[in-house]
Image: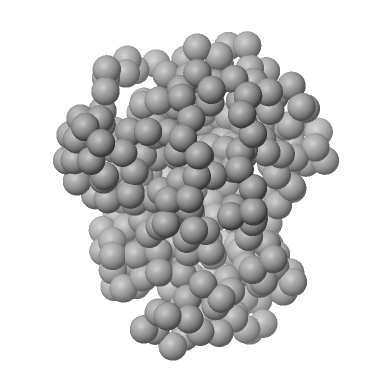
């Protein structure tokens, strides 16, 4: 297990943006956050993949801020606008243990990259007695150096692989290097966890690669799956092909294709390609394409431990 730097936020390079901002001095990085732990929601969550949510829920911690900042983000109230409550490191540690005591199947850190050193410190203290898997739920735009802080601490990686095309990554997420960085990231994640395993229908370790099918981007989705099948052994991972895109959060985007939902043809052809490639995993029904699947972050505050 790698040692942690005392503070990686003084000239922050935690994500591939490498903005170099001193977040410890109260300055805001590309992620929109200082070093203060800002959290939008802490609760059991039933809307993840079946082996993550199970019957009792995934113990999710939704962090405010995000370095990727996609133009169609359904969580923009927390990812861009910074809605959330400031926690101390000790308060977050206690909240994680309270979630565990509620009987959740795992602890699920959502959009956590910009707080990696703090989370890693907490996990180093409690991992040996936590008793349930730790999930790293991220956008796939990760630095290998940062991921190595988590070696031995994270059991299940749940990254997005959003784009194969650098042009789409530039247009939709201002990150033309996204395909290259995501490739490096999922390769490192697989190196750390090895093959995906379940026990009693619940994920125990491994990598589940998520891909959100976007309207008008069917060909790119096919290339994403082909690429994933090339760089990772299909039999050792799972893929989650999502249909939950909704235009409600992208009507101001300058790309007209993002103003509609995914068609049956677009989605079914992506599922068929996954099957052809030998990729196993999860899919969603048409009913997922609604903003009702987005938590009401504005209507609640995470409880104090």
Residue 23 x %, y %: 25, 36
Residue plotted at (19% across, 46% down): 19
Task: Answer above or below: position of 6 versus 41.
Answer: above
Task: Specify the quadrant that holds the C terminus.
Answer: top right
Image vertical order of residue 272 relative to residue 282, above or below: below
Seen in the picture, residue 244 relative to 112 is either above or below; the reply is: below
Residue 119 visible? The answer is yes
Quadrant hosting residue 24: top left
On screen, residue 218 versus residue 104, left or right, reads left
What x and y, as percent, mark residue 296? 64, 56
Report the front residue among 100 and 227. 100
**Residue 8's image quarter?**
top left
- Residue 80 against residue 93 in the figure, above or below: below
Percent across and percent down for residue 13 are 23, 38
Q: Locate the N terminus by quadrant.
A: top left
How many numbered circles does the render carry? 0
Whether residue 184 is visible, yes or no, is: no
- Rendering colour mode: one colour
Which residue in the rendered view is the most extreme toward the bottom? 256
Between 46 and 30, which is closer to the camera in this rendering?
30
The quarter of the picture where residue 98 lies is top right
Q: Nearer the viewer, residue 248 or 5?
A: 248
Q: Is residue 47 left or right of residue 84?
A: right
- 75 to the left or right of 70: right
Residue at horizontal 53 percent and vertical 26 percent from the top: 92
Residue at 58% of width from left, 71% of height from top? 245
Q: Residue at x 62, y 75 (%)?
A: 267
Residue 142, percent from left and from top: 35, 44
Nearer to me, 219 or 87: 87
């Amino acid at each position: 297990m790698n040692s942690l730097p005392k503070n990686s936020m003084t000239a922050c390079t935690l994500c591939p943006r490498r903005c170099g901002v001193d977040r410890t001095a109260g300055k805001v990085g590309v992620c929109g956050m200082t070093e203060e732990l800002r959290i939008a929601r802490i609760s059991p969550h039933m809307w993840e993949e079946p082996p993550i949510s199970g019957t009792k829920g995934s113990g999710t911690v939704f962090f405010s801020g995000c370095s990727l900042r996609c133009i169609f983000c359904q969580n923009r109230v927390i990812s861009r606008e910074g809605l959330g409550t400031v926690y101390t490191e000790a308060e977050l540690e206690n909240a994680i243990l309270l979630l565990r005591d509620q009987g959740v199947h795992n602890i699920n850190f959502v959009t956590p990259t910009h707080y990696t050193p703090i989370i890693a410190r907490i996990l180093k203290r409690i991992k040996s007695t936590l008793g349930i898997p730790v999930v790293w739920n991220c956008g796939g735009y990760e630095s290998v150096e940062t991921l190595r802080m988590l070696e031995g601490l994270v059991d299940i990686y749940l990254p997005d692989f959003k784009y194969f095309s650098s042009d789409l990554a530039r247009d939709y997420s201002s990150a033309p290097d996204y395909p290259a960085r995501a490739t490096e990231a999922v390769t490192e994640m697989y190196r750390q966890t090895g093959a995906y395993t379940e026990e009693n229908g619940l994920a125990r370790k491994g990598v589940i690669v998520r891909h959100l099918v976007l309207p008008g981007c069917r060909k790119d989705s096919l290339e994403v799956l082909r690429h994933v099948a090339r760089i990772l052994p299909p039999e050792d991972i799972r893929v989650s092909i999502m249909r939950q895109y909704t235009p409600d959060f992208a009507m101001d985007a300058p790309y007209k294709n993002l103003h509609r939902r995914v068609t049956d043809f677009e989605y079914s052809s992506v599922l068929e390609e996954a099957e052809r490639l030998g990729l196993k995993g999860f899919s969603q029904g048409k009913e997922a394409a609604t903003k009702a699947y987005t938590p009401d972050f504005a209507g609640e505050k995470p409880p104090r431990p």
